[in-house]
């Protein structure tokens, strides 16, 4: 089961056989095995492991990208300290 929260409107949606939409301008939609939104950075994943396993639109590659982005930020901080 997937669960995600839209940061813009605060709606928490869990997956089901029907697609659910949070209803705000970010248009987060949670379907059985995927999460989509206009801006995925405004979406908090509440059930991470299942998303990695799924073949949804938000894939393991997306999660790797988010992780890489976090690492870049850390590297930048280290650089500034030197
Ligand atoms: Zn929303």
Image: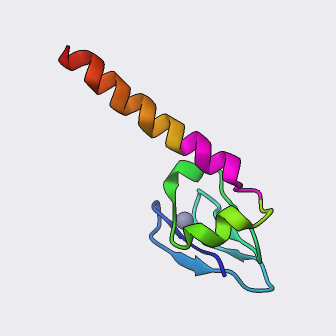
| Residue range of the region highlighted in magenta in the rendering | 57-66
Residue positioned 68% across, 81% down in the render: 15
Q: Position of residue 28 (x, y in %)?
A: 63, 63
From the viewer's perspective, tell me whether residue 56 is left or right of residue 35: right
* Residue furthest bottom in the image: 17
Residue positioned 53% across, 49% down in the render: 41
Q: Main secondary structure of the magenta part?
A: helix
Please, is residue 69 above or below residue 79 in the view? below
Quadrant into which the C terminus falls: top left
- Quarter of the view holding residue 65: top right
Q: Report the label total.
A: 0
* Residue furthest left in the image: 81
Residue 39 in view:
no
Q: Position of residue 73 (x, y in %)?
A: 38, 31
Please state which of residues 73 and 24 is positioned toward the viewer in this rendering.
73
Quadrant into which the N terminus falls: bottom right
């Amino acid at each position: 089961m997937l669960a995600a929260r839209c940061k813009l409107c605060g709606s928490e949606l869990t997956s089901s056989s029907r697609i659910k939409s949070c209803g705000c301008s970010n248009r987060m939609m949670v379907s059985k095995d995927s999460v989509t939104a206009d801006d995925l950075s405004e979406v908090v994943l509440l059930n991470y492991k299942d998303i990695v396993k799924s073949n949804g639109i938000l894939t393991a590659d997306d999660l790797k990208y988010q992780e890489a982005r976090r690492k870049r930020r850390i590297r930048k901080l280290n650089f500034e300290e030197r």
